[in-house]
Amino acid sequence: MNQKCLIGNVCGEEFCIQADAENISSFITGYGYEKNIILYTLHGYPLLTTYGGFLDRCYDQDFLRNELMPVFLPMQMGETAPRETVFFNNIQELPEHPAPVPDWDCCSGHGIYNRDDVWTPSREWRPEDGGSFVASGKELIEEVTLENEEEGIER
């Protein structure tokens, strides 16, 4: 898994989190068994879903098998404690090139349900971006500011 940050959607509320196995595991276990979670890239490509606190579908099987499961299972079983989840609270906190083109197949869902849902990205890549996030920091700030103004949120 080549992302530096992911969007975690918990019952419609979105969080931007650091994308590593321990942080993802802590984020999932932090919501317990009551919430379903969807993790996806900043472009809207899916990484994984949970159902009732359990991993449901993971699109990057190598990441699941080699990185996430060795950390997530002991945390889920209470053998290791979750760490404090690392969140990115504003655009300035994002690492450089936080959203490269995913290195997994985003179209093949692997989970307990045999559905062929097709996810549509919220942003497209351009070859000149070299696989990094399409929008510049300035464009993102303007976009967030506009969204906040529409919702009546002051900066």
Image (tube, rainbow, N blue to C red):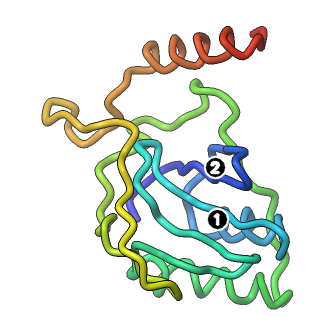
Are discs 1 and 2 less than 8 Å apart at CB? yes
149 on left or right of 98: right
- Looking at the rendered image, the quarter that the C terminus falls into is top right
Q: Please tell me how crowded label 1 is: few (under 14), some (14-19), or many (20+) other residues with Cα within 10 Å.
A: many
Looking at the picture, how far across and down is residue 126, in whole percent? 19, 33
Q: Residue at the location (53% across, 49% down)?
A: 5
Image vertical order of residue 31 relative to residue 4, above or below: below
Q: Which mark is residue 17?
A: 2
98 on left or right of 14: left
Q: Residue at the location (13% across, 36% down)?
A: 127
Q: Which residue is mark 1?
A: 24
7 on left or right of 104: right
Image vertical order of residue 124 relative to residue 62, above or below: above
Image vertical order of residue 135 relative to residue 121, above or below: above
Looking at the picture, how far across and down is residue 18, in whole percent? 60, 51
The three-letter code of the residue at mark 1 reads: Ile
The three-letter code of the residue at mark 2 reads: Ile
Q: Residue at the location (58% across, 11% down)?
A: 146
Q: Residue at the location (80% across, 65% down)?
A: 83
Residue 117 quadrant: bottom left
> Which one is nearer the viewer's eye here, 27 or 86?
27
Image vertical order of residue 61 relative to residue 5, above or below: below
Residue 105 quadrant: bottom left
The CA distance from mark 1 to mark 2 is: 8 Å
- Looking at the rendered image, the quarter that the N terminus falls into is bottom left
